Amino acid sequence: MRIVGMIPVYNEVDVLESVIEHNLSQGIELVILDGSTDGSYDIAKQYLGKGVLAVRREVSDRFEWGLILERLYEMGLQYKPDWVLLSSADEFHESPYRGLTLKESVAKEDKRGFTLIQFNNFEFWPTDKDGDSTATDVRDRLKYYTWNDDCQFHSWKVADDITVRDGGGHYPIFPKNLKPRVSPTKYILRHYRIRSYQQGLKKVFTERLPRYPDEERRKGWHLHYDNFRRDEASFIIDSRNLTKYDDDGKWVLKKTFDWTRGLHAKPWANPPIPPGLKVRVSSRVPFSANLWKIIFLRKYRIPKKSSE
């Protein structure tokens, strides 16, 4: 089985190598679309022929997420994968099965007839407890997180006419004649979007907010940084509001911190629901925060977990 991971990169030089190494260790080959100005491209090129299949450089003044998704998917499909994995350059996708790589776990889902995998999204943040850490791998340095959401369908079995643009990176769009079978086992997504005060300040106010296209913001995309301020409190979080991860595979599925400062509680801040799809509302977060959560429950039933 071939699984191709698709990673867009824009100025993630401090974390990119760890993300690439992680994916390769999990049996995931990679295609990378880079528009960086900070040396990320040079890091990605070092892995060509070592598990990275292609690195394409496309520089733009705008963060056109829909176009980036389309280009990435086209790149990935060129290598005729059985499955694909959509990842950001600051994300680590993991298997929930202890002792199995991501590739081995996806093969297990494939054998059971499932075609789409859902991830629990755990957002890690810099805190008052880790400012003195000298660890180079962000997973060793930042230990505090909050569960954020589970509308992250980042891996699917390749089939004709699946598209990615309208899902906004949260889920693929399956053609009407093909119903996905979602695995009842949720996988693990560690997200490290903010890794220090200076990195976060530059990312939010220089590399993201000024570059988001108006036409995508009108869809409800790219609004999550709108309530950020330039003060340190927007980026360095009180550890009492988060949960410490002890590298034991035990995760707390509770949203203890809203890093958008209320934006996810506003219906207009959520991506639109494609016609004909049903929504499952999680009891762990406010109803309005789930209006965008496409979980295919009635149209695309997720089977109950077996006792296996």
Image (cartoon, rainbow, N blue to C red):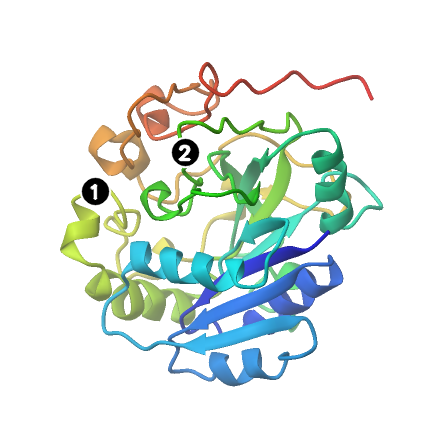
Q: Residue at x 45, y 76 (%)?
A: 56
Residue type beneath disc 1? Lys
N-terminal label among 2 and 1? 2
Can you tell which quarter of the image residue 197 is in? bottom left
The image position of residue 119, as x and y in percent, is 57, 38
Label 2 Cα crowd, 10 Å radius (few <14 / some 14-19 / many 20+): few
Residue type beneath disc 2? Pro
Q: Nearer the viewer, residue 71 or 170?
A: 71
Can you tell which quarter of the image residue 19 is in? bottom right
Q: Residue at x 36, y 61 (%)?
A: 68
> Is residue 73 something that shows in the picture?
yes
Residue 233 lies, with reference to residue 146, above or below; the image says: below
Question: Which element type, helix, strand or loop, lies under badge 2?
Answer: loop
Q: Nearer the viewer, mark 2 or mark 1?
A: 2
Q: Residue at x 64, y 25 (%)?
A: 184
Side (left or right) of 250 relative to 98: left
> Is residue 90 something that shows in the picture?
no
Can you tell which quarter of the image residue 66 is in? bottom left
Q: Nearer the viewer, residue 4 or 160?
A: 160
| Residue designated by label 1 | 219
The image position of residue 8, as x and y in percent, is 45, 64
- Quadrant location of the C terminus? top right
CA distance separating discs 2 and 1: 21 Å
| Residue 255 - label | none
The image position of residue 224, as x and y in percent, is 30, 47
Q: Nearer the viewer, residue 307 or 196?
A: 307
Label 1 Cα crowd, 10 Å radius (few <14 / some 14-19 / many 20+): some
Q: Nearer the viewer, residue 151 or 110?
A: 110
Residue 230 lies, with reference to residue 223, above or below; the image says: below
The image position of residue 83, as x and y in percent, is 61, 48
Question: Which element type, helix, strand or loop, lies under badge 1?
Answer: loop
| Residue designated by label 2 | 175
